Image (cartoon, helix red, strand yellow):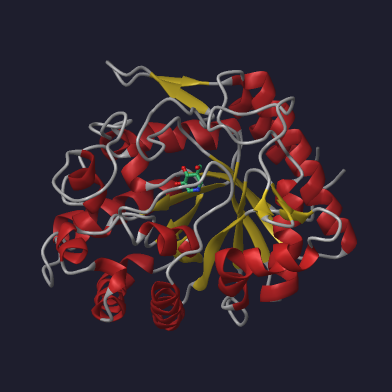
Amino acid sequence: MKFPEGFLWGASTAAHQIEGGNVNSDWWQREWGHLPGPPVESPSGDAADSYHRYPEDMALLAHAGLRAYRFSIEWARIEPEKGWFSRAALDHYRRMIGTARDLRLEPVITLHHFTNPVWFARDGGWRTDASVDAFRRYVEGVLPLLDGVDLVCTINEPNMVSVLADPEVGFPSVGLPPGIPAVTDRLIAAHRAAVDLVRSAGARAGWSVATQAYQPEPGAEAVAAAYGASREDVFLDAAEGDDWVGVQAYTRTKIGPDGPLPIPHDAERTLTGWEYYPPAVGEGIRNAWRRAKTPVYVTENGIATADDDRRIDYTTGALEAVLACIQEGVDVRGYLHWSALDNYEWGSFRPTFGLIAWDPETFERHPKRSLDWLGRVAQANAL
Ligand code: IFM
């Protein structure tokens, strides 16, 4: 049960979900009702205060035995006003990259993870053609940060960004809305521009897709293929020619003749209401490899649960699926768990995905047993 030599082991986060105080982002403004969008259970507020506590967070990962930390840099902090770049914000992220390096953690940098600056949202966000140039300008502005960085994710889960571009979109109880075709086209154009820029800085560029393991019932193969086309496949196809592709997998969606089927009543559900289904990651990896034809990194995989033993069971099952793909000949290069920390799950702090918990009043960190466990797996490079 050995992983290939040099396999990258780590954990992932996203700025808005852990930093706190991300006041210039569209999500913050939505949370407080200043921009359109459905009401949230709680605002992100101080989140985990990782904006100030990142050295401790990174040290916990490194000391557990992990070798990579994926985090996002926040466009709304770096370019809080259109065309004005904050040197202090760039310095902050430069320090984060330096801290990771000092701890011998490979920094994996995401340039865009769901949140946008308020001005970008007010200008129409990804629903306008100007969005592509705005994103290109932002990426040009952050290139100096990428000096010495190896892996850069341009846009996290563009398939979800295409859906969320309509702030009023309604989510069905199973499956996903189809996304907005014009937004999908712009995201692909923005990604292509970013890939060229990131490569010019000497880093390897890719993007990470939320794979959904669409499983057809007998006879529903064509329905499942059509369902997955705009929601997943178009983004994986667009990754062909990239240096790598990221797979982010949590659960499956069964598809019947009329579309997504409800989760069976007796199935175990996680705190996000998703079916407990560890093999999902293997299905995402195979689809990504088949379509993008480039090395695969699992850039997110995990479970929202209050029971850390279930987290270890889930991750064991997921890693077995990763190994099966490797044994079939798929070039899988790393596994980054979601998430390093319990975090703001886009409207609520209740679904806890973290390897590390924290006290909501003092922010004191409480590493979970699963962190130690994953660190030992990483050190052994074996399950
Ligand atoms: O928390 C999210 C993350 O921001 C993107 N991928 C899925 C995670 C769990 O829902």
Q: Position of residue 289 (x, y in %)?
A: 73, 69
- The residue at the point 82 percent across, 50 percent down is 323
- The residue at the point 35 percent across, 36 percent down is 347
Who is closer to the viewer here, 146 or 272? 272
Q: Residue 381: in sight, yes or no?
A: no
Kindly indicate the quadrant of the structure image that contains residue 268. Answer: top right
- The residue at the point 41 percent across, 37 percent down is 345
Who is closer to the viewer here, 262 or 307? 262
Looking at the rendering, in which quadrant would you find the N terminus?
Answer: top right
Kindly indicate the quadrant of the structure image that contains residue 116. Answer: bottom left
> Residue reaching furthest front?
258
Q: Position of residue 373 (x, y in %)?
A: 68, 27
Looking at the rendering, in which quadrant would you find the C terminus?
Answer: top right
Kindly indicate the quadrant of the structure image that contains residue 375. Answer: top right
Q: Residue 332: in sight, yes or no?
A: yes
Q: Is residue 167 left or right of residue 88?
A: right
